Image (tube, rainbow, N blue to C red):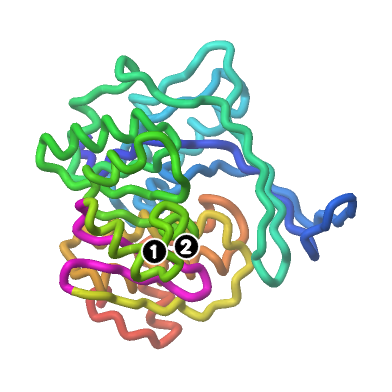
Amino acid sequence: MDISVVGVGHSCIDYVGLVNRIPAADERAIIKQLTCQVGGLVATALAALARLGVKVGFVGKVGDDALGQMILKEFTREGIDISRVVVEKGASSSASLVLTEEGTGRRTIGSYRAFEDLSEDEMDRDYITSGKFVHVDGRFPKASLLAARWAREKGLEVTFDCDQISPHVEETIRFTDYLIADEAFPADFTGHEDVVEAATALLRLGPKAVVVTLGRKGCVAVTAQGIIRQPAFEVKAVNTLGAGDVFHGAFLYGLLQGWGLEDNLRFASLVAAIKCTRLGGWSSLPTLNEVKDFVSEAGISFPLLA
């Protein structure tokens, strides 16, 4: 298999309940819709890439329970290579409980993390460095660092979905080409409240670009050449769960096409916005043709998709 992107990181089952409002402590809310779907940062990014027509492979760990089988089945359905996934005997798989507020997309999330990391013995270096990009999420700190280091040593580029301060995070950033962080991480890590100042401080650690996703406010990218701001596309959001992960997958798609950073940010924002208009898990991820149809129907100018 000619894999373009290998992802090393987290996968889980998400139990997602749609409620009319997020309940306060000791309050109840009626769940209007309940779904069970596969999630995880790297996992969802790879699924987004696969929907766009890119061959991808996943390196991670699941338990040998029913949830683990569900995760592997969904990976296979999406065409994601799982030949290097570790299935741990006697272990439970990771899961999350998500309440999503109807109308606003606000969420409350509780997570069960079944595994702390992957050992070096559980990682196939040749496989991880067999593509063009390596994508990590830091959920397995040592594995993320190791994969990023191996990629750098082979001359591959690394993207890092970074949303929390974890062991080895600074070391991993130093082996990262494109750091994509959520709104909270840059301030938490650097101490700078201003997003551009925080991103600039992260840039000094070595990435070519630091991208910060800002939800409804879009995203901002900082490079040695300057600052790029991309507004969010205005859509009627019904499900924002995983939108950031989809952004990362679409961003990687743009990198594979050789697009400039500005076009890449716009495309990633567009794909994430389309995902937010649909209920469901990976079934809500758009194909490339669906992205093109959306652009055409919405009257959006995007010459690279013509």
Left or right, 91 with respect to 1, comes to right
User: Where on the picture, by quarter, is residue 8?
Assistant: top left
Could you tell me if residue 76 is visible in this image? no
The stretch of residues the image draws in magenta is 206-225
The circle on residue 96 is: none
Vertically, is 234 above or below 30? below
Secondary structure beneath label 1: strand
The front one of 168 and 287 is: 168
- Residue behind mark 1: 212
**Amino acid type for the residue under numbered disc 1:** Val
User: The N terminus appears in which quarter of the rendering?
Assistant: top left
Does residue 208 belong to the magenta stretch? yes
**Amino acid type for the residue under numbered disc 2:** Glu
- In this view, the residue farthest toward the front is 191
Q: Say few, some or many: other residues with alpha carbon within 10 Å of mark 2 (under 14 / 14 to 19 / 20 or more).
A: some
Distance Cα–Cα, label 2 vs label 1: 6 Å
Left or right, 294 with respect to 36, comes to left
Left or right, 59 with respect to 18, comes to left
Q: Residue at x 57, y 31 (%)?
A: 113
User: Where on the picture, by quarter, is residue 228?
Assistant: bottom left
Q: Residue at x 36, y 54 (%)?
A: 249
Secondary structure beneath label 2: loop
Q: Say few, some or many: other residues with alpha carbon within 10 Å of mark 1 (under 14 / 14 to 19 / 20 or more).
A: many
First-in-chain label (2 vs 1)? 2
The circle on residue 183 is: 2
Q: Where is residue 76? Give x, y as percent.
A: 43, 35
Badges 2 and 1: C-beta atoms under 8 Å apart?
yes
Does residue 274 belong to the magenta stretch? no
User: Where on the picture, by quarter, is residue 146?
Assistant: top left
Q: Where is residue 59? Give x, y as percent.
A: 36, 31
